[in-house]
Image: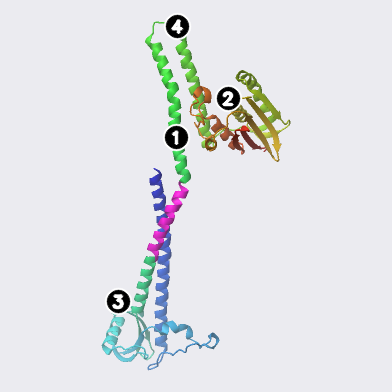
């Protein structure tokens, strides 16, 4: 899929760039064609403005701009091969080549006849490759100026070939640029796609276990339909427990899905974070006591922020549960600290014990990730807790991080803005 998306990205870029480049080059060719036609037309007018037998103007080299004579702006037009003829009674009576070109009487006569046959005063003779401009005098004569189109066609042919070469080179360059940019642009998409596939695979695996247990237990119950419920209570209790765990997993997945779609419902209020953390610590005191973990807190009173109390309580419980569960010898301890840090509130949950390997730290907040693969569901949960914690922190526009060393233990730090 990613490969097809990448080539589609490149193709769309090439189509857009090719279209824009084609329009620009076509406009350039049209502009140059118009300019060449204007030069030929100017040359025709210059020929008709000369008297019979008058030669084309001569130009001097290295003349300063301020000393140029009137009419020098038409230098390009005067260099175009042109001649004129005078027609009386349908016959060519005079040919004026201006000392520029050699034209035979036969060619001049044929050009004059074809120009008169068009019935227009200005036009093109494709068979002869000429432009013409006709002028009628009060004496009843007709003067016709002709300009050779060979130079126009040659110039346009060169321009077309140049534009075609530029188009091909530009498209080739944009292809390789698009190839490079597509790899950069689609890298986050590819990462997200891999994470999604891994997420679906992990979720399916986690759901498969309780479903298997539920099906096995119900199968046992159904295999003994005549026995009373009291004798099969064990299997029903197992089924209920697995169903409860599966319900919790589905709720966690739904929470994360809503967070991904920016549909996570929040009810912000002015919350006292110190009281909130204290309220979360009380249920964990017996849990910590049973686990032989010392639970301490250092909370600065009066620290409030705007946020969703339910989500913030869930955040604190996730961090406390994680810390108590993995606090290690020789003196297992968990310390919760809450303090003000400039315009933010800083919550840290620290536990002693074996450090988390450095290669696992960047992945701790990924879904279904467990630093210790040997931990089963009863010990390590589903691997969604820290992912949910990060989602809650990001919903409150905060940041969460973790550090872990052999000497200092493991510390989760949450920074939350007060507003």
Calculate the distance from the C-alpha at mark 4 to the C-alpha at mark 3: 107 Å
Q: Earlier in the sequence, mark 2 or mark 1?
A: 1
What residue is pinned by disc 1? 198
Nearer the viewer's eye, disc 2 or disc 4? 2
Nearer the viewer's eye, disc 2 or disc 3? 2
Q: Nearer the viewer, residue 242 or 226?
A: 242
Q: By what rule are the colours in the image chosen?
A: rainbow
Nearer the viewer's eye, disc 2 or disc 1? 2
Residue found at x 70% / y 40%: 343
Nearer the viewer's eye, disc 4 or disc 3? 4
Calculate the distance from the C-alpha at mark 2 to the C-alpha at mark 1: 26 Å
- Quadrant hosting residue 208: top left
Q: Secondary structure at mark 3?
A: loop
- Quadrant hosting residue 391: top right
What residue is pinned by disc 4? 231
Describe residue 399's horizontal placement relative to residue 250 as left or right.
right
Q: Earlier in the sequence, mark 1 or mark 3?
A: 3
- Whether label 4 touches label 3, CB < 8 Å: no
Q: Secondary structure at mark 2?
A: helix
Count residues near mark 1 (Cα–Cα under 10 Å), then give few for <14, some for 14-19, many for 20+.
some
What residue is pinned by disc 2? 325
Calculate the distance from the C-alpha at mark 2 to the C-alpha at mark 4: 35 Å
First to last magenta residue range = 166-186
Which secondary structure is most common in the magenta stretch?
Answer: helix
Seen from this angle, which residue lies furthest bottom? 53
- Whether label 2 touches label 1, CB < 8 Å: no
- Whether label 2 touches label 4, CB < 8 Å: no
Residue found at x 69% / y 27%: 297
The x, y position of residue 185, in whole percent, is: 47, 49
The x, y position of residue 95, in whole percent, is: 33, 91
The x, y position of residue 378, in whole percent, is: 51, 22
Describe residue 177's horizontal placement relative to residue 146 as left or right.
right
């Amino acid at each position: 899929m990613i490969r097809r998306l990448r080539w589609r990205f490149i193709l769309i870029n090439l189509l857009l760039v090719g279209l824009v480049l084609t329009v620009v080059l076509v406009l350039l060719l049209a502009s140059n064609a118009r300019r060449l036609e204007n030069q030929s037309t100017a040359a025709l007018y210059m020929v008709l403005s000369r008297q019979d037998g008058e030669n084309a103007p001569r130009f001097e080299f290295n003349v300063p701009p301020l000393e140029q004579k009137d009419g020098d702006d038409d230098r390009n037009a005067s260099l175009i091969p042109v001649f004129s003829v005078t027609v009386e009674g349908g016959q060519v009576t005079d040919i004026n080549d201006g000392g520029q070109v050699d034209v035979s009487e036969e060619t001049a006569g044929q050009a004059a006849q074809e120009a008169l046959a068009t019935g227009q005063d200005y036009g093109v003779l494709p068979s002869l490759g000429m432009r013409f401009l006709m002028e009628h005098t009060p004496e009843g004569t007709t003067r016709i100026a002709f300009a050779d189109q060979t130079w126009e066609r040659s110039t346009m042919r060169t321009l077309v070939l140049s534009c075609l070469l530029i188009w091909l080179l530009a498209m080739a360059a944009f292809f390789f640029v698009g190839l490079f940019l597509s790899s950069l642009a689609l890298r986050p998409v590819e990462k997200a796609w891999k994470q999604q596939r891994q997420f679906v695979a992990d979720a399916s695996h986690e759901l498969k276990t309780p479903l298997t247990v539920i099906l096995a237990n119900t199968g046992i119950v159904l295999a003994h339909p005549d026995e009373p419920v009291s004798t099969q209570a064990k299997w029903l209790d197992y089924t209920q427990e697995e169903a409860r765990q599966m319900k919790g997993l589905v709720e966690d997945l739904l929470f994360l899905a809503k967070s991904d779609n920016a549909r996570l419902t929040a009810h912000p209020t002015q919350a006292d974070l110190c009281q909130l953390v204290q309220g979360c610590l009380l249920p964990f005191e017996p849990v910590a006591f049973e686990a032989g973990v010392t639970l301490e807190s250092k909370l600065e009173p009066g620290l409030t922020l705007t946020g969703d109390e339910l989500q913030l309580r869930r955040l604190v419980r996730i961090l406390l549960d994680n810390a108590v569960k993995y606090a290690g010898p020789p003196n297992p301890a968990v310390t919760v600290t809450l303090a003000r840090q400039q315009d933010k509130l800083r919550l840290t949950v620290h536990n002693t014990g074996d450090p988390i390997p450095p290669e696992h730290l960047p992945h701790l907040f990924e879904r279904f990730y467990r630093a210790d693969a040997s931990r089963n569901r009863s010990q390590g949960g589903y691997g969604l807790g820290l992912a949910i914690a990060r989602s809650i922190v990001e919903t409150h526009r905060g940041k969460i991080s973790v550090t872990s060393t052999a000497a200092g233990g493991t510390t989760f730090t949450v920074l939350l803005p007060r507003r």
